[in-house]
Image (spheres, coloured by chain):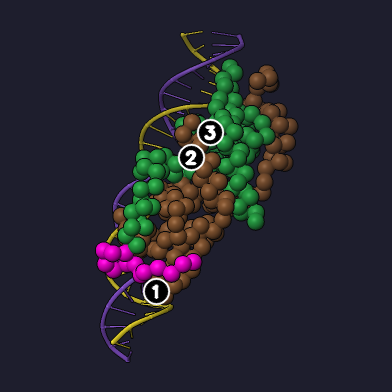
Chain colours: A brown, B green, C purple, D yellow
Amino acid sequence: MEERTPCCQQEQVHEDLVRRVEGRLPGDELLYDLAELFKMFGDSTRIKILYALFESELCVCDIARLLGLTQSAISHQLRLLKSAKLVQYRREGKTVYYSLADAHVRSIVGQGMEHICE
Amino acid sequence: MEERTPCCQQEQVHEDLVRRVEGRLPGDELLYDLAELFKMFGDSTRIKILYALFESELCVCDIARLLGLTQSAISHQLRLLKSAKLVQYRREGKTVYYSLADAHVRSIVGQGMEHICE
DNA sequence: ATAATATATGAACAGATGTTCAAATGATAG
DNA sequence: CTATCATTTGAACATCTGTTCATATATTAT
């Protein structure tokens, strides 16, 4: 809330402030990876899959039936979730069962839900 | 890990399980909104903006300079973050200062960072 | 071996997203 | 009023994303 010298047009901006903030930012690569992680939560199909897995381990076609999408679509999404280490799987004969990989998933989704329910 | 009857081809699948899970899923609209929220975190420009605002309130052109993007690009992104209630702003003359809106932002981003740093 | 079934993968396409450029709005100073 | 500056907005465009369809792989049974 404190007053500050104005900003944009010349070199002497909030130059020192900007530089200080810049010094504290995590590296570009890390921030890129973080955005990639959140992209996984940023699609309603994938969010539904994760919520479903909150309740129970499920096979690919269970999820497909649950969401009303093709098995192929679900499989593509599961591959993404797997690559982000949000889900894991086990094979049982022809069937592959997926489940949550990690406790962070619940807490991230939970915090998000809290935010929108306020 | 328990064995189960197989799944996909007929009606009698994991039908009861699927129905139980279905009953516990939040409504489509809520899940859609949740995905929309996480989309906000799913872009490295916006993640950088949020991280910058962890450090300090900043004006639009500070952020533009910090990220090396046009002020227009930042403004577009801030509009999205504002509509998701992740940032707030105050006007001071010609300048508009943005800051974080809400404690959830830090905890969501923090949990995400923990996940990828494991 | 072949057939049947569950899942995975690749290509293609429509729709969404992020940036830039140009122009508009809002605020202050003269 | 006009001029100037910070920000916002709209349009255009290239890129990315999610789905479907067709096909491939993997497992089991015959």
Q: Give the x, y percent position of residue A102.
A: 56, 56
Asked if the residue at tag 2 contacts the one at tag 3, i.e. Cβ–Cβ closer than 8 Å, the answer is: no
Q: Can residue A80 be seen by looking at this rendering?
A: no
Q: Give the x, y percent position of residue B54.
A: 65, 35
Q: Which mark is residue A113?
A: 2
First to last magenta residue range? B1-13
Q: Which mark is residue A16?
A: none
Chain ID at mark 2: A
Residue at 62 percent across and 34 percent down: it is B53
Q: Relative to the observer, which residue lies in front, B104 or B99?
A: B104
Q: Which mark is residue A94?
A: 1
Is A44 situated above or below A74? Answer: above
- The amino acid beneath tag 3 is Leu
Chain ID at mark 3: B
Residue at 72 percent across and 41 percent down: it is A23
Q: Label 2: how many residues lie within 10 Å, few (<14), some (14-19) or many (20+)?
A: some
**Which quadrant holds the C terminus of chain B?**
bottom right
Residue at 46 percent across and 67 percent down: it is B2
Is A22 situated above or below B89? Answer: below
Q: Label 1: how many residues lie within 10 Å, few (<14), some (14-19) or many (20+)?
A: few
Residue, disc 3? B86
Q: Would you say A65 lies left or right of D26 here? A: left
Q: Give the x, y percent position of residue B105.
A: 57, 37
